Image (cartoon, helix red, strand yellow):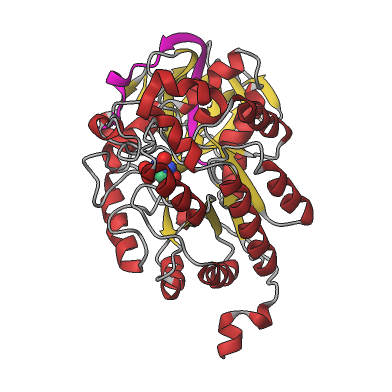
Amino acid sequence: MDHAPFDLAITGGIIVTPEGRFAGDIGIRGEVIAAIAAPGALGAAHETLDAAGLHIMPGAIDVHVHFRDPGMSHKEDWDTGTAAAAMGGVTTVFEMPNTFPPTSTPEMLADKFERAKSARIDFGLYGLLAEDNIDQLEGLIAGGAAAFKCFMGNTTGNLPSPSTGAMLEGFEIIAKHGHRISLHAETASIMAWRQRKLMAADRNAPLDHLAARPAIVAIEAVIRAAVLAEWTGARIHVLHISSADELRPLREAQLRGVDITGETCPCYLMLDSEDYARLGPVIKVNPPVREPHHKEAIWQALLDGTIGLIATDHAPHAPEEKTRANIWQADAGFPGVETQMPLMLTAVSEGKLSLEHYVRISAENPAKAFGLYPVKGAIRVGSHADLALVDLAREDRIDQAKLASLRSRITPFHGKHIKGLPIHTISRGEYVMKDRALVAESFGHGRSVHTVQHMAKPEPRHAEQTMAAVLR
Ligand code: DOR
Ligand code: ZN
């Protein structure tokens, strides 16, 4: 038994896991949790944090953020994006490839690793799966891509959606390695058709964006992706679930044994079509916020486990890009990585979900789905000391003027009253936020998670019929 003092002891707090909560002290050595002890039983430490009154949770793992560098760093970059994450109790992010140019080759991935050197918290980089880069997928995996993103529908960056043929071969290749493929599951051709007709009829109000993207676009895309995953054995993840209707194909695929996970974001749980008049183009997001009954069904699916993850689709844009009067010209999305935890803790305070369930959807399930568990997403001896210490009683109001995403200080949640705030964020044993202030030394502390990622290889299916096998 090693009796050296701990580097940091966290004492007097309540530890929260998906299974329950208990009073306990945490001893950290270096980057990992070295001991979990009954209150007062930990032993000596170089530094002690008094966590009385705080709940200690694994830091949130947000598998869906856009940090915009290269190409759109007037909206966000790795410094400001990960500062926002640290302020929001988030200790790992997975960053999307619709930068400019997109992360579609090993060279672009290497370029993004360079840019991510300023990260304050840990990160995974998404590689793109598109029509024209199928021969780059193996190289992206070798280069350290933590997951893949496939845009079945258009959004910021206007990346063309791949044909079903290209998707199938992409799934075949990625399936061999076990990396998860996250889907923007909206069918592009339906949306383009409808948007053209709406524009021709001079319809350009915020609600017309919703009219261009009815839930059938998500149903069709989820079904198509699920059958490709079922055929190939690929693991997939449905991003930003926005509708009641796509839940049925999601559940059906899960019941058939497809390795398919789903996420939703606070806007689909807390906003609905009645908010368009009040918020105007600021509410524009892809997929759109829908009619009120969708919100209720998504809550239900989050509670029953059909939707296993909460993420944010953190999509920063400059305020002037978000407020153009013609809805087709306004940019889609808004920052979210900093506000997810306070918003969801507020929902906890309202009795909409338990704190334990929140830990499951914000940390444990994302870690499991993306191969990080139990190195991350757990408060366990040996796990990374990635922690969010929250005050459930602390009340505040979301103020967009104070967001750490300096160039995109605009959110539909501006002014919302919240109850529950992260007070300290610890990433691999180091403070990145302390007493609600960003820690300057956190600049550059973040590391790619691909080195600790473990994706068990799935059973290959129809291996003899893959494009590679047929051409061999
Ligand atoms: O509204 C959105 N904005 N949805 C997405 O899927 C992408 C995002 C962005 O990159 O701006
Ligand atoms: Zn996104």
Residue range in magenta is 384-408
Which corner quadrant holds the N terminus? top right
Can residue 55 be seen from the camera position used here?
A: no
Which corner quadrant holds the C terminus? bottom right
Name the foreground residue: 320 vs 405: 320
Can residue 290 be seen from the camera position used here?
A: yes
Name the foreground residue: 446 vs 285: 285
Image check: 45 left or right of 41? left
Image check: 449 left or right of 443? right
Point out the residue furthest to the left here: 74
Q: Is residue 314 above or below residue 128?
A: above
Figure quadrant of residue 269: top right
Verify whether residue 176 appears in magenta. Answer: no
Q: Position of residue 113 (x, y in %)?
A: 32, 56
Q: Position of residue 268 (x, y in %)?
A: 54, 30
Point out the residue furthest to the bottom here: 472
Residue at 45% from the left image edge and 39% from the top image edge: 313
Residue at 32% from the left image edge and 43% from the top image edge: 119
Figure quadrant of residue 159: bottom left
Figure quadrant of residue 383: top right
Image check: 72 left or right of 105? left
Name the foreground residue: 455 vs 379: 455
Point out the residue furthest to the front here: 201
Point out the residue furthest to the right here: 255
Q: How many marks?
A: 0
Verify whether residue 403 appears in magenta. Answer: yes
Residue at 21% from the left image edge and 40% from the top image edge: 74
Image check: 190 left or right of 402? right
Residue at 40% from the left image edge and 51% from the top image edge: 448
